Amino acid sequence: MNESNSTALHRILVAVDGSENAGRAVQFAIELARHFGSEVTVLSVYKHTSHMESSLSLVRTRQVPAPPDEVMHDLAQEAVEWAAERFTEAGIEGVETMIRRGPPARTIVQTAKKNDADAIVLGTRGLGDVEGFFLGSVSHKVNALADCTCITVR
């Protein structure tokens, strides 16, 4: 935690990706925010996908698909809006939402640091790809890189 000898969680960063485990992380963060009266930021990070990279995996259609980054941004937007609604329904107001593009684990940790978060809450094994099985999951990397408390929810 950022304040020495303090067990209060003044600021919580909740990382979401639209997965079931991210939903569980949101529920857990709601309880933490209620208990500590914390400020909450909901963050979704998407990885840049080039047109060349995506064209190798797209099924050919007659319609021209939207650029991959636009699609990923829209999905991230849906995830943070869904999470923010859960906080509002639970009576927690003033939740900040953020969408960032970049390497997920590093971007989560950098955002937590920049926002002076006391804790990061995220789910295990979200919607990551096969790369996660070989290089390690986002939650594992966040736990290894972060200076603040990390809570990984199953």
Image (tube, rainbow, N blue to C red):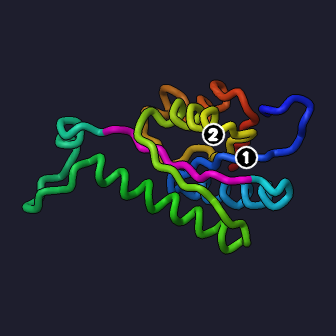
Can you tell which quarter of the image residue 116 is in?
top right
Against 72, residue 110 (above or below) is: above
Q: Determine the residue positioned at 78% across, 32% down.
A: 2
Q: Determine the residue positioned at 86% across, 44% down.
A: 8
Contact flag, marks 1 and 2 (Cβ < 8 Å): yes
Residue found at the very far left of the displayed protein = 62
* SS assignment at label 1: strand
Question: Which amino acid is tagged 1?
Answer: Arg
**x then y, percent, for residue 57:** 22, 43
Which residue is disc 1 drawn over?
A: 11
Frontmost residue, 34 versus 54? 34
**x then y, percent, for residue 32:** 79, 54
Q: Determine the residue positioned at 12% across, 53% down.
A: 60
Can you tell which quarter of the image residue 33 is in?
bottom right
Frontmost residue, 108 versus 154? 108
* SS assignment at label 2: loop
Q: Earlier in the sequence, mark 1 or mark 2?
A: 1
* Visible residue check, residue 55: yes
Q: Is residue 30 left or right of residue 101?
A: right
Frontmost residue, 93 versus 142? 93
Question: Which amino acid is tagged 2?
Answer: Asn
Q: State the extent of the magenta-drawn residues as a range.
A: 39-48
Which residue is disc 2 drawn over?
A: 115
Residue found at the very far right of the displayed protein = 5
Q: Is residue 5 left or right of residue 18?
A: right
